[in-house]
Each structure stands twice: as structure tokens, then as C-alpha cells.
Amino acid sequence: MASRIFDGLELPASGDFHVHLREGAMLEAVSREIRNGGVETVFVMPNLVPPITTVKHALSYKATIEKHTDVKCLMSLYLHPSMTPETIREAKESGHIYGVKSYPAGVTTNSDSGVVDYEQFYPVFKAMEDEDIVLNLHGEAPPAENITVLNAEEAFLPTLLDLHQRFPRLRIVLEHCTTAAAVEAVKKCGPNVVGTITAHHLFLIVDDWAGDPINFCKPVAKLPSDRVALLKAATSGSPKFFLGTDSAPHPLRAKKGGLGAHDAEKCAAGVFTQPYATQLVLEAFEEAARKGVLEKSDLTPFVLEGFLGDFGRKFYRVEPSGARIKISAREEKVVERLAVGGANAEAGDVVIPFRRNTPIYSLEWLPQKP
Amino acid sequence: MASRIFDGLELPASGDFHVHLREGAMLEAVSREIRNGGVETVFVMPNLVPPITTVKHALSYKATIEKHTDVKCLMSLYLHPSMTPETIREAKESGHIYGVKSYPAGVTTNSDSGVVDYEQFYPVFKAMEDEDIVLNLHGEAPPAENITVLNAEEAFLPTLLDLHQRFPRLRIVLEHCTTAAAVEAVKKCGPNVVGTITAHHLFLIVDDWAGDPINFCKPVAKLPSDRVALLKAATSGSPKFFLGTDSAPHPLRAKKGGLGAHDAEKCAAGVFTQPYATQLVLEAFEEAARKGVLEKSDLTPFVLEGFLGDFGRKFYRVEPSGARIKISAREEKVVERLAVGGANAEAGDVVIPFRRNTPIYSLEWLPQKP
């Protein structure tokens, strides 16, 4: 192990503004891990089966999550034809719903109910603008001729620019940016448009998921130059870019398309980073600094605290709790797997975390000042 | 099922100028399938463990294969530092060794002994030129910064052009072309440089192997425009392009990186097409004609017979046997799996064929004329 530049670093607790917590035994296993990643606030994605399209469903999901964790949950709805401007007003009134997530149809896990055409949602977007509810975009063009997993994000960017122009007061998150083009598009827009960046996309390129189901996610990791653009955006100090891990747990059997001797199905898309959300980001920055991709001098407290929490909290207008975390360089490694137990779990289900069995910073929560 | 344009087509038996037959139980299972794909001649790749680097090993492998099949086997050696000009002369004298396969180090299955730098092999290439032994190139640049699975083939093309210039009489095959750039490079070279094209690359693009271990191979399938370039090259009537399926059987457990509840290894690269070599090519051409990518009128007997066998036989200077095959449109489907039995097989090993359980042309061997 070379120099550990974040050893001893103290930070405000992080925010993770894009998480998948699932339901049942998986929710139980995953929600317990949020604080292990140094995170006190999460923006919870609504792609359950069926998706969360009503305020009532969102609130009952929030109550279920809170049985297992005390982190602050910013809830969301799944953009759906059943949604009306009235839904948005009701969402705002609830005080717990911060965003509406749009999935283009068919591009990722549980997106079958997703959007094909945005025009039908203009009245809903208008209501979101008025009520100051955020639009969270999974920014990939749906499958079509000459659209591939590699250019789907870039092909979506004109839609982002168009929506921003039509609804300039609408606050928009381009979720899990994976390309230099996406970073540039977010920069080009006004301050109402921001982008989240995951921990794993700070590490991965196409080669890392080619033939590796554990590293396979949507949007897929792209080219080395895209990875560099994400690292630079995340450490630019611009409040337009902040952490949303898109941590997406799947049982190993789903990641591999079945574990039976005759199962040959496709792999579920998603990378699981929740237990190490903060630590992985710091590892990625450190590796990039070691390789000369980033300057160590760029990694100021303002930059780190901003990307890991402050910028996201400011965007979503939530207050930090004041809790602080401390990073240490010890002999810790990412665990090999997370067991998914409980009465609802299929026997033997495990989730394989990103960068299993590799060295990782330790994280502890500092005692709260009285 | 739309019109079946090859129903009733009779052809000379095919040649498959790039096959992986493996050893032991897998060899037994796979070699029996060669004739089911309408193939009478195969060029056999040498990437066993350990690789075939001596004439003696190649000949004993040939004898082993011939215990299981009566197809004509063109044998090859694995380009390796232990090889000398004397090895090449010995290979030529054997009468059974047609080529030397070069694997850049680390790019695919069993390529750990592969090439890092070609200069050390110039004396061997000179001997190959003199003895008229073919150089078979796995044309991918080895891993390096800014080299990805997507651009590795294109990054290799200057090496192809350089070798062609240095050894203009050396006959070279750029194996399993996957990009428009590779097709153009092969066209640009003199007649001593040709390219093989697989059946599966006539079907696949990047989206098809993203998260699908069964469709994952090296070189990876690229963009829709690359697939079109391959289809057009394969049906151009140019003798520079002919079939080499690169059929590469792996047990399902290897394709998926293990089938255990805790196995999370990488997937073996390789697509298994052997039992349907000829049929899959015709299916790909038919689909392309149906979608307007190819003209039905381009699919002349000269074009089909050339790509499926004549061009390869002429390049390798082997005679057709005179045997003929017949294609029919029936209710046949690609089998779900191939069992790998025999005393050496691990219990339950199966190989999943490409396009399992999808409709496929039937193929029969016509009775030989007396």
C-alpha cells in the first residue's frame, strides 16, 4: 500500500443521493449498511415492483425503511402515466417526497413501466416546477437502431437540454453521469441542473464489466477518458456534481443469471457499494492522485465535503445533522459478501460488494458534541 | 417466421478456418458436432494448456482429434519464444501444419504465453515466408492505458500493416475481424492478407454481450456499424474474407465464473457455434437481407460458396472433397445445451450454444456421387 493521504481525515457525515434499498430481507440487510458507508442522508429510488407511483406508497415504504435504519430518507416517486399535477401537490404537502424519478422504458432494473415520450408529462413537470419537486433523470435513450449501451447517455443529452429549456425553474438531476459528454451538458445548463456521480464509475471502464457480472451496471462504465472526466467533475468543487452511489444490490444468483447447472439467463445490472459509499470515493480520488490523474492539492476539505454531502444537501435543501465521521488507514478490506438473511430470503442469498476483498479505508462515526 | 430464402439450397461442404476443439471430454463432445455444421475442413487453433509450440505436439493433437472425427484438420502452432526457423521448416515438412497463431499476451482464453513484442519473431516470420506457412493473428493490442476491449482491434491494425510491409510474401490472416476498421485494413493490404469473420459477429453488437456471459467473446462484438461492415465484407465476393467461426466451447460454469453460491469470478470469453457453423451464417445473411442491410440479390452461389468454404480453401491451398450439403427450412431450433460427458468430464458440465432455442435452418449431407 502506497501513501494513504486521507488517513485521519474528519468529515461531516456524507449524503448519498441515489440509493436502491429494495424490500424485504434485502432492505433489512442493505439499510443496516448505510451508516457503515458514513452516510446520514439518502435519496431513495422508487423502482420497486410495482414501482412507487403514489404518495401513500412512498410514505409506507419510508416507514418500512425506518424500521431498519435511522438515516434521513428523501423519498421519490416513479414518473408514470397515472401521475397528475395533483399527485405532485400531494407529494409536496407530505414533506417527505423530494423528487420524481424518470426511467426511460426498458433500460435498467425494474424500468419496464418507464417513459417512452416525455410530452405527456409536461403538465406534471409544470406542477413540479411550481412545487419545487426535483426531476431525477435516468439519462439514457431507450433502445433503438444505432443506440447502444455505449452512446445511450450521450444520445439522451438533447432531451435533458430540451427539458431544461422548457422548464427552466424545474430542478433536474442527471443521475449517475458516466460520460465526459454528460458532464459537459450538466455544466452547460443553468444552476438548476446538476449531476450525480457514483463511486463505482470513478473506478470502472468498459473492460472492467466486460465478462464481469459483478461490475456490470446501467449505465455501463465507458472509456478511460470518461472516467477521467468524472474524477475531475467530482473534484472540481462545482456544486453541480455530488455523490449518488446508485448502490444497487442484487443476489449473486441474479447478477449471474442463475446459479443452476442449466441457467444461462442475462445478468442483473447493478453494483453494490452501500457499506463503503464514502470510503470508495476517497479510494478512487487517492488512486487518481497517485496516478497523476488528479492533483493531491485539488483534494481540499471544501472539495471532499462538497462532493460527499454539502453540495447534495444544498441542492435538496436539507440540513446536515452535525454528525462527523473519521477516516483511517488500517488493514481493512472490503468484505467478500453480504449475507441476506431473514425469513423472506431465499436460502443462501448473498450480495457481492464492489471491489470485494480489496483494501479499503476504515470509517468510524465520531461522538456527537453535546 | 418470414420467408426462408435459403430453403433447399445445396452447397459444397463448408470450411471453418478458426476452431477451438479443446481436449478430453470437451474435444470428444465438440468434434462430433463439426459435421453437423456442414463443415468438412477445420483450421485448429493451438491454445491448449500448455499451448502447442512443437510439431510433435501438433501431430499428436491431430491424431487425438481424428479419433473422434474424420474432418480434415489443418493444424497450427502457437507463436512462442521457444520457436525457431528450424521449427517452421519442420512444420512445413510434416505436411499437416498450415499456420502459426499469434496471441498478444493476456487478451483472451489461454493467451498467457502470448506475444508482447513482435521483433523477436522476425527470423521466424522470415522462415514462414520462405516455407509458405501462414501467420494467424489475434489482432488486438495488449492491455495498456487508453486501450479498451472496444479499440484494441483498431489499435492493432498498424502492427498488421507493419508486418505486411516487412514480410510482403508472408500470408497473414487477421482472425475474427470485428470492426469496419479491420475490414478496411485487410482490403488495403495485398492479396496475401485476408480476414476471417465469425458467425456470431454477424449477429452481435456490444449490447448483446453486456450482461450476457453466453454472448461474451474476445474480441468483443462492437457497434451496429461494425456489424454491417462485417456482413458486407462477408457477402462482397472478395476472396479476402471467409468463415472462421472461432467457435470456443466453455462449460457453463466457466462462462459464468462459477455456479457456486459464492463464486463471483469473471466469465470465460468465447461463443460456441460449431454445430451450426454454416446454418448460422445463412441465418445472419437472411436476417440482414430481411432488414435491408444486405440485398437478397447479393447472396449469389459464388458469394455464399466463397465465404463458406471456397475462399478459405484457396487461401490455405486445400482441395474440396466434393461433398455437398443441403439447407432446409424446417421447424428446427438450436439446442438448449450440449452435454459434455465421458470419463474426464466434471459432473453436469454443459456448453450453451449461441442463439440457443431459436429457429435455425436444418442441414443434411447429400449422398456422395459415385
Image (spheres, coloured by chain):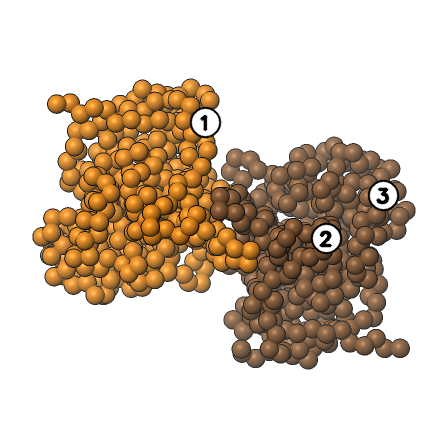
Chain colours: A orange, B brown
Any mark on residue B56, and which?
3
Which numbered disc covers residue B67? none
Q: Is residue B220 visible?
A: no
The quadrant of the rendering that contains the C terminus of chain A is top left
Q: Earlier in the sequence, mark 3 or mark 2?
A: 3
Label 3 to label 2: alpha-carbon separation: 26 Å
Between A252 and B129, which is closer to the camera in this rendering?
Answer: A252
Name the subunit of mark 3: B
Dot 2 falls on a residue whose secondary structure is: loop
Q: Where is residue B159 shown, x and y percent of the image?
A: 66, 41
Estimate how packed mark 3 is, as few (under 14), some (14 to 19) or many (20 or more) residues with alpha carbons within 10 Å. Answer: few
Judging by the rendered image, the residue that carries numbered circle 2 is: B343
- The label shown at residue A291 is 1
**Residue A89, quarter of the rendered image:** bottom left
Rounded to the nearest whole Å, what is the CA distance between mark 1 and mark 3? 47 Å
Chain containing the residue with disc 1: A
